Amino acid sequence: MSRPTHGMMTLGRLAKLSGLARSSLLHYEALGLLKPAGRSAAGYRLYGETQLERLRSIRRYRDAGLSLAAIAEMLSPRKAGASRGRAPSVELLEARLLELSNEVERLRSQQRLLARLLAMPEFRAARPVGDKAAWSAMLSRAGFSEADMRQWHADFEAEHPKEHAAFLRALGLAATEVSAIRRWSRQ
Amino acid sequence: MSRPTHGMMTLGRLAKLSGLARSSLLHYEALGLLKPAGRSAAGYRLYGETQLERLRSIRRYRDAGLSLAAIAEMLSPRKAGASRGRAPSVELLEARLLELSNEVERLRSQQRLLARLLAMPEFRAARPVGDKAAWSAMLSRAGFSEADMRQWHADFEAEHPKEHAAFLRALGLAATEVSAIRRWSRQ
DNA sequence: TTGCTCCTCACGTCACGTGAGGTGGC
DNA sequence: TTGCTCCTCACGTCACGTGAGGTGGC
């Protein structure tokens, strides 16, 4: 019961799989939100799929802005007298909630990248960036990956083509470079 | 200089206009992020358009996930030697950042509503909701306004028509009610 | 005069983050 | 043996929130 069973994982492993910090998981445990399935002989916390699933629920609700106290309330077994089982409609709404979380996460990562770019003194300086290579280098220093750059230009071009062009010209890029980037953004 | 000038506003007024809590504004002041333009004879803080603009910048960056310390760093006047003035490209990116903030806010409000709906015991109960009137009443108790309901069904129908239909049936609505809601969602 | 807003501390809260000091497993 | 992960306190941090006790303006 308290020895490592097949499929059991330790705190660090669960943290990695769930994408949460170890300190968060310990915090949830302190609040009574997430208990290990058991302990190893050496006292290590051991978790199973059940806990991972529960953690995913916690994340969904936390991402939706609920307080941990409210989540604990939601996930606690219903009081006596309430009908048992889950309504099928619950699954659908939870799926939708997850979708919203993912979309928010996508937008937030764009925000973070943009903010980092804006925070760069070289970018805020009044003089233009220069050419395409200098611009790529700056994006890279701001933490943009190759895929981020591509995605970012593609979104900009798709949503505001005129502003995208104006922006590239304002950077000091030559007309041929501007066209090249825009063509590549539309592919 | 410290008397109420035309266009000056007090703490509460600025809080309302900016959509932030008064305590947040006081906190920003304690950090040196936002200083009043002056004080009234009675000691009231007085703010002008300059401060409102600065606050909007703070919000944009905060919404993008920057810490207040990082924002203070960004908004502080550049060190000696740096070229003065703003690059025109900065404006464009800040506008984009604002757009992203607004979109995130829209999604987050949907999340909050959904989470509140999911938290309702009546909704989680295994027995179906019943008819259209009961469903509307439940949405209303979850904090949905008339516009929220409309928006929510419209999004659901537009993005996942099949799931929307399945969901409405799972609520226990009659086929005619399901069709009515879907038609109304597509208008 | 009533009711609302403002003031200044100071302490509370929420969701973690960060060591310090020590033990366990490939 | 080395390096990594784990353990348990306990205290720190970030961004506010919440009074307490008092003054100001229509």
Image (cartoon, coloured by chain):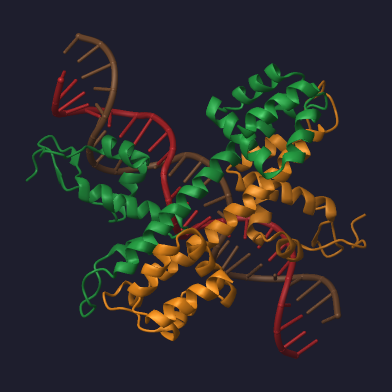
Chain colours: A orange, B green, C brown, D red
Q: Name the foreground residue: A145 vs B184.
A: B184
Q: Is C20 placed left or right of A6 in the picture?
A: left
The residue positioned 80% from the left and 30% from the top of the image is: B170
- Front-most of residues B80 and A43: B80
Q: Nearer the viewer, residue A176 or A27?
A: A176
Find residue A69 and report its horizontal and vertical position in percent: 63, 39
- Residue B169 in which image quadrant: top right
Instruction: Give the number of callouts.
Output: 0
User: Image quadrant of residue A45?
Assistant: bottom right
Residue in the picture at 30% in, 63% down: B75
Residue at (73%, 51%) from the top-left corner? A55
Q: Is residue A34 visible?
A: no
Q: Pick the quarter of the image with the C terminus of chain A.
A: bottom right
Percent x, y for residue B134?
70, 18
Name which residue lies at 83% across and 65% down.
A42
Considering only vertical position in the picture, is A116 above or below B159? below
- Say if residue A132 shows up in the picture: yes
Q: Is residue A86 above or below residue A114?
A: above
How far from the left and from the top, in percent, is residue B77?
A: 24, 67
Residue at the left extreme, as displayed: B1
Q: Is B17 situated above or below A169? A: above
* Residue B52 place in picture, x, y as percent: 26, 47
Give the position of the N terminus of chain A as an image quadrant. Answer: bottom right
Q: Is residue D8 found left or right of B125 in the rendered image?
A: left
